[in-house]
Image: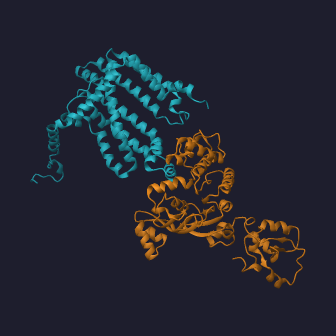
Amino acid sequence: MISGEGGPVIDCRNLWKIFGHRADEAMKAVREQGLGKSDVRDRFNCVVGVQDASFTVARGEIFCIMGLSGSGKSTLIRHVNRLIEPTSGQMMIEGHDINTLPREALRQIRAEKIGMVFQNMALMPHRTVMDNVAFGLEVRGKSRDERHHVAQRAIEAVDLAGWESKYPDELSGGMQQRVGLARAIAADPAILLMDEPFSALDPLIRRQLQDKFMALSAEMKKTTLFITHDLDEAIRIGDRIAIMKDGVLVQVGTPEEIVTAPADDYVADFVAGISKLDLVTAARIMQPLGQYAQGNGPQDTASWPVARPEDKLNELVELAVGTDDPILIVAGEQPIGVVTKRALLRGIQGRDDANAEGKAA
Amino acid sequence: MDENFNWLNPFASVDLGIGAWANGIKQWAISNREMIQPPKQFFESVIAAIEGALQAIPPVVMLVIIGLIAWQAAGRRAAGIVVACLIVLGLLAPEAWGLAMTTLAIVIASVILCVLIGLPLGILAGKNDRFEGLIRPVLDTMQTIPAFVYLVPVVMMIGIGNVSGVIVTIIFALPPLVRLTSLGIRGVNPSVVEAARAFGASPRQILFKVELPLATPTILAGLNQTIMLSLSMVVIASMISVKGLGNEVLRAMGRLDAGKAIVGGLGIVMLAIVLDRITQGLGRSGRERGHRHWWETGPVGLLTRPFRKTA
């Protein structure tokens, strides 16, 4: 068994979802004849929602799935708690395939292990904030006292104390989504599914809620699958990011990898407008010391500013402002590379300097 | 096919004997009357018990009770209208109040049965497209077929009296409740239902904790329509010997007695206004009531106020 602490919490394996009456036939044809999306649509009148998606999320990790509307990201996240059944492939939750669970066990996992936040809040308008937050506990048959006690903690965690007996329509959008967040964390689930939770909010409130969420998640260490159409948000929040397009996971990687080494033109277009200052590290743009010495002859590095390989461009800029010399990159005690002004400027632009070719991969 | 067959008007030459066939059903019903007697006795006694209770309460006490119910359900303004209508009803004629109570008993019995039958059917139709497709033409038939068509078979099978009256009333009054229950269930925001599923609710919990509460205003609008339609059936039901206000109208028609007709007719209208105001009040959404529970408003609210903790 790979369950338990070691293995990935969410392990999605070759997941396909084809919508339509003839989905199974279409799936078979895709397997045997390698049909494309448009062929499936023409021949079977079916729509491919998710195409061969595989990814894993480790315990405590925040995994962002970024894509435009219609890219299949909301479909994909609904497979994790089996709101949608896959046409083919597996969704392993802590080592168990959620699609083979009997109904009652599935309901228990949904109520106790997986919390979900929705883009449109999806609060129950006929229930108070308290009863909304306690819903998951209520359907598990917990006593009124117990569920109110637990729900109260969740409500306090999202700074909504004092609003327990209000109804959702008496709250602002940002507060409603905090209720949604409280409902998701009330049962203290191991996994959080966030389906574009902040997309419907105005920018200022969105920023506040992102901060609130990041503070909470740093504290609670929940394994989180976070859906967004906003790359800035994905970079801000995610430990790793997957870019999704037309049902396919185009690229999976850390924010830095996505920004500095986009897998194709589609991803490159996306990241073009993203500021690299806080993402790209010195290690990525530096020239190895030996190579630099070959080109420029032996140097006296004593007066050069010094930085570490994991320092971000922003810090390098600070160092470069005060001197005309290049920056020496030192790992531990050992000087390993050089960042020239030219490489730094190119790095901020998001391009590799000609001299550093072959280094950025 | 005879030689006189006219291709331009084929229907005149073909006789499938549907009328005779339907008559056969009637004959079958007559020959099996005994089968129906035990349930008929049961319903007869239930209706008699409701009527007995309504008649036993003195009119003034009844006026207060209905007034309080209206206040609780629909607020003070509606309660005023309801009480005024009841007073007008009582003043129409010395015997009007008693007749109205008889009619009310039939309406109550019909509506209870309508709810027992209509609510489950409506829920099923709301959840299942196929069932909705099946039941729709049946409901269309029930609403449009002239009452006189089924009056005769029902009387043949069950005989005249209150039970038959209740049955023909149900046939006419049931469809809006089924339709609006289905509409209400279908109108529930699917994302809220999805959220309930995501938090582990079973189909049963989703129905009772999410769908029915959110569909309640629509369902109550259906209940309101059902009550109105069952009131409008009392005149027709009086043709098969159902007593009450409808019977007054029917007898007045026979004797061309305009005075009696107005007493019966206005009585029905007053009763209709009373029932309409009360059930419409029930259908107000929580938001319109200022998000207060029902026990926090109206006369019950006055009674419970000392026991509630002040927020």
**Picture quarter containing residue A357?**
bottom right
Image position of A289 (left or right of B158): right
* Rendered position, B277 above or below B285: above
* Drawn side of residue A117 relative to residue B268, left or right: right
Q: Position of residue A230 (x, y in %)?
A: 64, 60
Report whether A130 appears left or right of A107: right
In the rendered structure, the colour chosen for chain B is: cyan
Q: Is residue B259 visible?
A: yes
Residue B222 horizontal/vertical position (percent) = 40, 37
Q: Nearer the viewer, residue A135 or B266?
A: A135
Image height of A334 relative to B123, above or below: below
Query: Residue placed farthest to the left in the image?
Result: B3
Residue A339, percent from left and from top = 80, 74
Q: How is the rendered protein coloured?
A: by chain
- Name chain A's colour: orange
Q: Which quadrant of the structure image shows residue A46?
A: bottom left
Q: In the figure, A57 relative to A170: above or below?
A: below
Percent position of residue A289, x then y: 81, 80
Looking at this view, is A155 or B24 the one in front?
A155
Kindly indicate the quadrant of the structure image that contains residue A115: bottom right
Residue drawn at the location 29% of the way across and 42% of the way down:
B141
Task: Count the numbered circles shown.
Answer: 0
Q: Is residue B102 visible?
A: no
Quarter of the image containing the C terminus of chain A? bottom right
Residue at x-position 80% and y-position 73%:
A332
